Image (cartoon, helix red, strand yellow):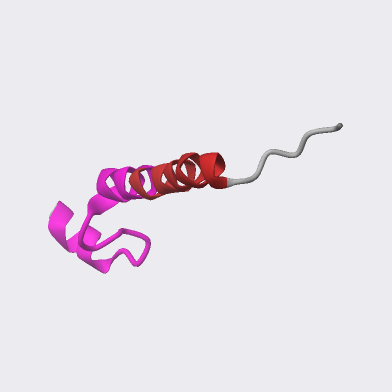
Amino acid sequence: MNNINDQVNNNPNTQRYLGDKGLAVLIAFLSAFIRLSTDLYLPALPVWQKV
């Protein structure tokens, strides 16, 4: 009977270094930079006003 470590190591769908939860946290962390960069650049854009 194989133990769980052998099954995880032989499964190509398992993320090797971070695990499933770590990969989800990494994706959430990286997606936060998209919003941060928008908030940083938005005040620098010129204001378009109808005169």
Front in this rendered view, residue 17 or 2: 17
Which residue is drawn at the image coordinates 31% and 51% (left, top)? 23
Which residue is drawn at the image coordinates 26% and 67% (left, top)? 10
1 sits left or right of 7 in the view: left
Most frequent secondary structure within the magenta stretch: helix
Front in this rendered view, residue 39 or 32: 39
In what quadrant of the picture does the N terminus appear? bottom left
Up/down of 28 relative to 1, above or below: above
Q: Is residue 9 magenta?
A: yes
In what quadrant of the picture does the C terminus appear? top right
Q: Position of residue 32 (x, y in %)?
A: 40, 42
Front in this rendered view, residue 20 or 32: 32
Up/down of 30 relative to 39, above or below: below
Residue 21: image quadrant is top left
Front in this rendered view, residue 8 or 21: 21
Q: Which residues are magenta?
A: 4-28
Which residue is drawn at the image coordinates 23% and 63% (left, top)? 16
17 sits left or right of 50 in the view: left
31 sits left or right of 50 in the view: left
Q: Position of residue 45 (x, y in %)?
A: 60, 46
Q: Is residue 1 visible?
A: no
39 sits left or right of 15 in the view: right
Q: Is residue 12 magenta?
A: yes
Q: Position of residue 6 (x, y in %)?
A: 17, 63
Q: Is residue 47 visible?
A: yes
Residue 46: image quadrant is top right
